[in-house]
Image (cartoon, rainbow, N blue to C red):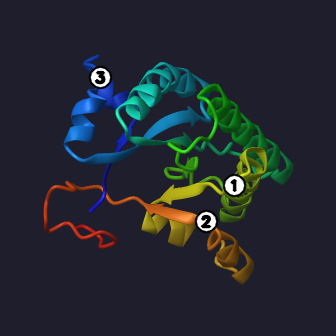
Amino acid sequence: RILGVDLSRWQSIDESTIDFNRMAAAGVAFAFIKGSDGLLTEDALAVPHVTTWAPAAKAAGILVGYYHFGRIPVTEDLAVITADAQTQAAQAAARLALLGGYDDRTLPYVLDMEGVSTKISDEAVTLWTTTWLDAIQLATARAPIMYSYRNFLATRYLQDPATVEKFRNYHLWLAQPGNPADPAVQVGQGLS
C-alpha cells in the first residue's frame, strides 16, 4: 500500500502541530489537504491550515494535493447552478495559484462531492459537477480527481451514457472510511 493522509482543520482541533517529517519517516508518501470550500466561512477556516501545511509537507518530501469541498446551491435554476460551479472552480484555481501552482510535488486538485441536499435534483448535481470539473481543468490545464462515496455516485448523478463517459475521464478517489492500518480493510470493498 502507498500511505497517504487526508487533512483538514479537523485534524488540528487541539491546535497541535502536524509533524510532516515524522509522517514521511513513517512512510507517508502523499497528503491531500483541504484547499478550498464553497461555503465561504468554511473556506476561511481552511486557509491558515493549507498555507502552513502544504509547504511543510513538501519540505518533508511528501507529495501534496488539494481538495475543494463542493457546495451546490439549492435551486433548480440551471443557469445559477452553472455560474456557481464556475465561481467555485475559479476559487479553487485561485487558491492553487496562491499555493504556488502545480509543480513536480503537487497532485491534481480534487473535487469532494458528498452530502448534497435532497432538494437539489440529480440533473443539477450532474450539471454542477461536470461544470466544475471542466472549469478547473481549463483554468489549471490539468485533469482534476473526483472524490465521493459509492452510494452518492450511484444515486445522485445521471446514469445516461454521456454522463458515464464524461466521468470516465477522471480519476476517482473512492471514499471508504475505516482504519487503513487494519489488514482486513481491502481497498474498494464496502464496510459494514
Q: CA distance from mark 1 to mark 3?
A: 31 Å
Q: Disc 1 residue type?
A: Leu
What is the quadrant of residue 62 in the picture? top left
Residue 188 location (% of width, % of height): 34, 71
Residue 176 location (% of width, % of height): 33, 60
Task: Point out the tag, 2 or 1, that comes first from the N-terminus.
Answer: 1
- Taking the image as shown, residue 150 lies to the left or right of residue 20, namely right
Mark 2 burial class by Cα count in 10 Å: few <14, some 14-19, many 20+: few
Q: Nearer the viewer, residue 11 or 108?
A: 108
Residue 156 location (% of width, % of height): 58, 65
Q: Nearer the viewer, residue 48 or 73?
A: 48
- Name the disc covering residue 133, or none: 1
Image point 58% across, 47% down: which residue? 109
Mark 1 burial class by Cα count in 10 Å: few <14, some 14-19, many 20+: many
Q: Disc 2 residue type?
A: Tyr
Q: Secondary structure at mark 1?
A: helix
Q: Which residue is denoted by mark 3 in the rendering?
A: 13
Image point 63% across, 34% down: which residue? 96
Considering every residue shown, the one lying at the far bottom of the view is 161
Number of numbered discs visible in the structure rendering: 3
Q: Which residue is denoted by mark 2 in the rendering?
A: 170
Task: Point out the tag, 1 or 3, that comes first from the N-terminus.
Answer: 3
Q: CA distance from mark 2 to mark 1?
A: 9 Å
Q: Nearer the viewer, residue 191 or 108?
A: 108
Q: CA distance from mark 3 to mark 2?
A: 33 Å
Residue 183 location (% of width, % of height): 13, 65
Is residue 134 placed above or below 99 in the rendered structure? below
Considering every residue shown, the one lying at the far right of the view is 79
